[in-house]
Image (cartoon, helix red, strand yellow):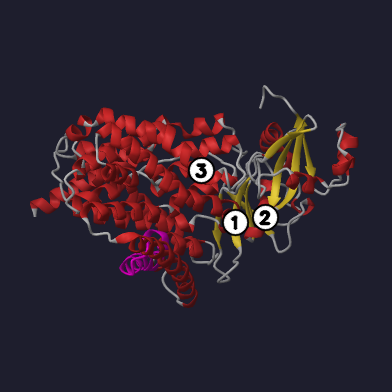
Amino acid sequence: MDNIEHLFLLSGILLCLSVFATMLSARSGIPILLIFLVIGMLAGESGPGGIEFESYSLAYSVGNLALAIILLDGGMRTRMDTFRVGLRPALSMATLGVVVTSGVTGLIAVYILDLSWLHGLLLGAIVGSTDAAAVFSLLSGRGMHLNQRVGASLEIESGTNDPMAIFLTLTVIGLITGDMNGTGETLLFLLTQFGIGAVAGLLGGLLLVKVIRRVELAAGLYPILVTGFGLTLFAFTALLDGSGFLAVYLAGLVLGNSRLRDMEYILPVLDGLAWLSQIGLFLVLGLLISPADMWAMALPATLISLALIFIARPLAVLVSLVPFFRFTSRELGFISWVGLRGAVPIVLAIFPLMAGIPEGMLLFNVAFFVVLISLLVQGSTLPQMARLLKVEVPPELSPRRRSMLGIFQEDDFEMFLYTISSESIDGVVVRSLTFPPHCRVAAVFRGDNLLPASGSTRLRMGDVLCVIGRSNHLKTLNNMFGGDLDAARSKARAFFGDFILDADARMADVALMYGVDVDESEAELNLGDFMLTHSNGHPVVGDSFVRYDMVWTVADVDGDQVLKAGLREDDPEKD
């Protein structure tokens, strides 16, 4: 009984410390996952905690369980429209990019660690993929608003590159141990990993959506159903020799984009489970490491880490993106910098230990150190690099809260809460506002009082509005009520320019009005077509180029159609 109580006590203390550590991360800028790792190391046998933990098989099981839940939650929060601009470059980085990163890192490790070619390439394969837990956590939790092309490419890459890293790791282990026979078997293993994983994920996601539509459950049971289904899909796909990681990510993607009314019950619980998974995973991995052994490899591991950050990752990005896609040099620079390593390399580093490879412990300690350096160097500097490379866009206005009403199974009405904080609508009567069709103000709260939501109600600063509408109304409603509109417009002007024009304006008229000397070949184009002519593939908000001594910036899009564009004079010092 005492052992159980001590286990519960230690587990509770570690969880509480990890939760409170999120506040330290927010204030200091240190990546939260790095703090989780350090807490786990301090709790281990070499730290003040003194917990003895050497079960690599248990750490492997915990790692797979945690990563499955993290990827399921990440897929549910990835919007399908991001695939329009991010899918193809992400898949290129998730396949060709991982191969290049692994190969270059492995070759460098051969010389630094004096390893054989196969053992060096094994280390490269272990650390070759970016980590979904690290990317999802740092990109969503650091207040950055990246342009869609960059953000989507990074998120989709991190969710889909694990199969290639696993394939490379197991293939090299098979070559070292003699269990891998021939090129044909290797290619078949690669195809089954990706093919079965993709098919199982998409079909599993569609099946899960149908099940949720047809069953009536208590609200708290829906997230349990989704979690159980996700873990079942992960295991079933792995039994078929497919990638369970890819399957659960795609299943989450299908579910998250189905707009079911029960998603308001599912998402908050899955968010909590994803946090618990990250905490548990990094604590267990921190317990597993021996700081003394790790620090003994500090110098060579640091050199390999720096080579991965400054040579292998940038080279992989150039090879996998430049020949096929139109990214700006700044976008390529930021994508190169966000080669975050996290839990996946540490979990993969357990494979050689379980396979009985003599150099397994060396590879594990180096991989762990690579993760620490990556989180410390890259993870701590993401906001600064985003600003330096100018890949951020002004934050979108949003409601303070939104929730589905549960009236329709799909395309349900939602409740949006806004706080009036803009002087431009202070004193405005509700009836004078132009709302989208089937969209209404349901209630107005002023202080502790509920006011009638009538057309004669005059809005005041600080009022809380409860607006009923659908998700396709959100952009219009945000532009009406979403925060301090005056401050938002000021930020927009600073980014896009003083003149934000509708895309249907003729370039000849723009030239006449703003004194721009436009070529005859472009004078008859409308502004939207002009922007598309000079865009980097699929247009996204923030795309810009210099022409006619003016900076032209995409300010709003609908799919591949430019709706608005900003115009300002070219200032080389500002740019």
Q: Residue furthest bottom?
A: 214
- Outermost front residue: 182
| Mark positioned earlier in the residue sequence (1 or 2) | 1
Q: Are marks 1 and 2 in contact (CB under 8 Å)?
A: yes
Q: Residue at x 78, y 45 (%)?
A: 530
Amino acid at the residue labelled 1: Asp
Percent x, y of residue 79? 55, 56
Which of the two discs, 1 and 3, labels the residue nearer the N terminus?
1
Q: Quadrant of the N terminus?
A: bottom left
The span from disc 1 to disc 2 (Cα, nearest Å) is 8 Å
Q: Which residues are magenta?
A: 223-247
Say which quarter of the image contains residue 473: bottom right
Q: Residues within 10 Å of mark 2 (few under 14, many from 20)?
A: some
Figure check: 191 above or below 296: below
Marks 1 and 3, Cα distance to the nearest angstrom? 26 Å
Q: Which mark is residue 319?
A: 3
Q: Please name the residue that numbered disc 1 is placed on.
A: 81
Q: Which SS class for mark 1?
A: helix
Magenta region's main secondary structure? helix
Q: Which residue is mark 2?
A: 559
Residue 235 against residue 392 in the figure, above or below: below
| Image position of 115 (left or right of 389) | left
Q: Is residue 472 above or below residue 288?
A: below
